[in-house]
Image: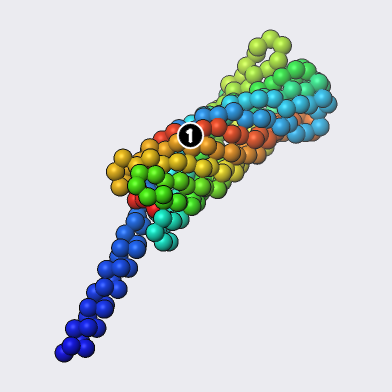
Amino acid sequence: MKKIKKFLLTMAMTMALGTSAFAASGFEFILNVPFGINWSIPTGELKGKGAAMGFDAGVDAQIGYMFQVKDGFGISVLGELGYSWDAYSYSYADDASVSDGSGSSAGMSFQLKSGFVSFSFHSFKLGLLPKFNIGFGGRHGLAVGIGGGVKIPIAGQIKLPGNNESLKATRKDIAEFLSPSVIGYIKASIDYYLFFTDNIAMEFGLYLGGDFGPKMAATVGGFGGNAFDFGLQLGFRFGPKA
């Protein structure tokens, strides 16, 4: 009987310790607002092309689950979705005619003159962002994330040099006029969490990233570009501490 009691006590202690070790695992939800600048890097064969500064902002929701690996360390598997506004600017010293598509913007036909051209897009964002969570005890935590996904432009605008002319584009125009019609992105972030309770925290973060932008398929050499992004993000986190 004593051996049975000892065995049951050992099992109970093992289960209690196991439950305690993984008690911090759980559902995680983050809502944040990223905003920053980008350095647009032109591609294509137009002469005299040069980089210029642009801007980006948005609203992101990150949803998933944090797995507690050990006390003070957890791994989050998060899906990312949200709204993104991105403005890219490029300079060039060549002229080009653009005429393509059958969308609502009269076929998106215009003449490019040397100077600056900018693209801005309103996009739906969809991606994956795993994070490594570090707990410092008490109210403080840190998370490092790296991931990527796609931004799907649903509307946009092209501003042309010289006469401040701008052309608005629908999703149909973008699909016909730009190739590819989506923007791939990669992203790395580091976030500091200040916990108000065991499951609610304020987020203060930095992000670095890269956008693989579309090209104007109708121009010679497919003028377009990519961008390097960096900025701040503020938000709230709902989920267990590491």
Q: Position of residue 142 (x, y in %)?
A: 45, 46
Q: Position of residue 41 (x, y in %)?
A: 71, 32
Say which residue appears at 43% left-offset and 44% top-offset: 62
User: Residue tagged by mark 1?
Assistant: 233
Which residue extends farthest right? 47
Q: Quadrant of residue 231?
A: top right
Q: Position of residue 134 (x, y in %)?
A: 45, 51
Which residue extends farthest top? 163
Left or right placement of residue 218 versus residue 66 in this view? right
Towards the viewer: 238 or 169? 238
Graded by Cα atoms within 10 Å as few (under 14), some (14 to 19) or many (20 or more), the crowding at tag 1 reads: many
Say how the picture is coloured: rainbow
Res. 9 visible in picture: yes
Say which residue appears at 47% left-offset and 47% top-offset: 143
- Numbered disc total: 1
Q: Quadrant of residue 97?
A: top right
Say which residue appears at 73% left-offset and 31% top-offset: 42
Res. 173 visible in picture: no
Quarter of the image for the N terminus: give it.
bottom left
Which residue extends farthest left? 1
Left or right placement of residue 9 versus residue 81 in this view? left
Q: Position of residue 26 (x, y in %)?
A: 35, 55
**Residue 231 drawn above or below residue 197:** above
Q: Quadrant of residue 200?
A: top left
**Residue 114 drawn above or below residue 150:** above
- The amino acid marked with disc number 1 is Gln
Please tell me whether mark 1 sits on a helix, a strand or a loop: strand
Say which residue appears at 35% left-offset and 62% top-offset: 22
Towards the viewer: 167 or 176? 167
